[in-house]
Amino acid sequence: MNLDFAKADGLITAVIQDRASGRVLMVGYMNEEAFRKTVETGYATFYSRSRQKLWMKGESSGHRLVVKQISTDCDRDAVLVQVEALGPGVCHEGYQSCFFRKLDEGEWKVSEERAYDPNAVYGDKA
């Protein structure tokens, strides 16, 4: 589908945005297989750089991301994936978005309440 996976060692950046609110929920990485699975299944699938394998968002938590639209940037080395988030939150730390800290007078501060208890969903892996 003409994306440039070669530029960053086989990966493209995937910005995940809530389609209804416009809020950025997370950023992940996709290789060609993850991108193809995302398109084929309609659920956001990523490549884990630390585990060196594919993972579908929500495979442990059930908090899946239903793809509504995919766009690419001018260089075709990043995608914007607009989704409907199923579940109370996307972040493995229990927040609606992975972007729950804001820089305030030189310090990162939590800027919202947790949406769910990560220990109840992931156990000690959170």
Image (cartoon, rainbow, N blue to C red):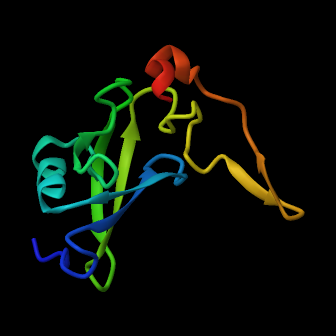
In the rendered structure, the answer to whether residue 43 lies left or right of residue 2 reads: right
The residue that appears at 23% across and 74% down in the rendered structure is 9
| Residue 85 figure quarter | top left
The residue that appears at 47% across and 37% down in the rendered structure is 90
Q: Nearer the viewer, residue 39 or 19?
A: 39
Task: Give the answer, above or below, for where 94 lies relative to 78.
Answer: above
Q: Position of residue 75 (x, y in %)?
A: 29, 85
Task: Give the answer, above or below, for where 4 lies relative to 122.
Answer: below
Q: Position of residue 120 (x, y in %)?
A: 51, 14
In the rendered structure, the answer to whether residue 110 lies left or right of residue 42 reads: right
In the rendered structure, the answer to whether residue 120 lies left or right of residue 76 reads: right
Task: Say how many tags the image has.
Answer: 0
In the rendered structure, the answer to whether residue 112 lies left or right of residue 54 reads: right
Q: Position of residue 30 (x, y in %)?
A: 25, 59
The residue that appears at 19% across and 74% down in the rendered structure is 5
Q: Position of residue 47 (x, y in %)?
A: 25, 52
